[in-house]
Amino acid sequence: MKTQPLVNTPLEVSRIAYGCMQIGGSWDRSLMTDQTKRDALAAIRTALDLGINFFDHADIYCRGKSEEVFALIWQESPGLREKIVLQTKCGIRFPGDPDESAPLRYDFSYDHISHSVEGSLRRLKTDYLDLLLLHRPDALVEPEEVARAFDALHQSGKVRFFGVSNHTAAQIALLQKYLKQPLVANQLELNLLHTHLLDEGIAANQDRPAWSIRGEGTLEYCRLHDITLQAWAPLAGGAVVGNFAEKPTEAATKVAALVADLAREKNVSREAIAIAWLLRHPARIQPIVGTTRPDRIQAACEGDAVELTREEWYCLFIAGRGDRLP
Ligand SMILES: NC(=O)c1ccc[n+]([C@@H]2O[C@H](COP(=O)([O-])OP(=O)(O)OC[C@H]3O[C@@H](n4cnc5c(N)ncnc54)[C@H](OP(=O)(O)O)[C@@H]3O)[C@@H](O)[C@H]2O)c1
């Protein structure tokens, strides 16, 4: 697995990261079964064996069980902690927390950020996080308070670096105005069937309704400020390789067929083609692969060795966006 620098940090990270969202087994309050623990360890081991050194979490994943089960890896691999990059997120609060009337909401208050990190450190059984991301933009964000929380976490050695997720360029700029630490990552949904970030740059200043997306250049902003783009749902839950959870759209059918053709032509897995499409972008996008199945993790990681031509990349892009280019 090739690596790349995580700019504005001394960290060297695998081009592909492993997303731990589902390794806790279920999102309800039930306890983890022994089978869930065995499956989680098998997925983590597979990722490590394939050269992945970057693991993505969030405090909410499987209600904390994903972080908790991840910590089992320390028992079988002492010394691993310093060799990997652990990222988690905070800022989403479940309905019913702390009382029944509370809705799902976002919370970037000093107290919530601090409290969330303490919980993640406890569950992950570690003294520090390499990266902490703010999960989804909080409409009531007070950047001064975020800055206070980040300062305390940084000074205490509990968090080394910071970033955001699902944030626009303007939201990042607003936060950065108050933060001492640079925001080094922005994690966003990006895959062959979810191309808004790329469409913004193509569709600006066009009349045709489908082309008149008003973006604010989030992708370009991140490139300009050395903020690594992490792509969540890189396989669109399997849809880009033809595993459809529901009746596929025309674009999904076309993408899956094109991905299958290219995979046959290059003698690689279909997952590899979908991942290679993200890696081909010069912004050095880091896909966060989330399948829990070792064979699928391996298939996705094959994408590291696949080179797509400009023509192949554009054929896939056009199929995915579901419309010709201007
Ligand atoms: N920042 C955010 O807001 C946000 C949101 C969502 C996710 N994330 C992060 O991104 C990571 C990846 O997200 P994701 O799980 O939605 O990504 P994904 O890699 O696009 O999809 C993986 C899901 O698709 C299923 N799947 C079906 N066929 C598949 C195939 N052939 N290959 C691969 N997967 C297939 C997997 O099930 P099996 O496990 O059975 O293979 C799994 O549930 C998460 O783990 C999390 O770390 C972040």
Image (cartoon, rainbow, N blue to C red):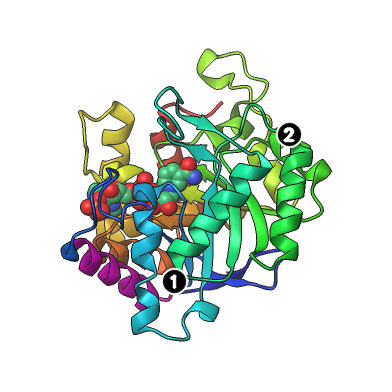
Q: Amino acid at mark 2?
A: Glu
Task: Answer whether residue 219 is visible to the viewer in this image.
Answer: yes
Q: What residue appears at the point 68 percent right and 47 percent down from the top-left corner?
A: 222
Q: Is residue 227 magenta?
A: no
The numbered dot on residue 52 is 1
Going by the numbered disc 1, the residue's amino acid type is: Ile
Q: Quadrant of residue 290?
A: bottom left
- Where 197 falls versus 123 (above or below)? above
Disc 2: which residue: 142
| Depth check, front residue: 119 or 185 | 119
In terms of image quadrants, where is residue 69? bottom left
Residue 16 visible (yes or no): no
Magenta segment, prevailing SS (helix, strand or loop): helix
Residue 47 belongs to magenta span:
yes
Q: Residues within 10 Å of mark 2 (few under 14, many from 20)?
A: some
Residue at left offset 45%, top offset 74%: 1
Mark 1 vs ligand 1: CB below 8 Å: no
**Magenta part of the chain:** 36-52
Q: Nearer the viewer, mark 2 or mark 1?
A: 2
Where residue 206 appears, as percent x and y from the top left, is 63, 19
Instruction: Check the image and report above or below for 52 versus 259.
Output: below
Residue that appears at 49% across and 58% down: 120
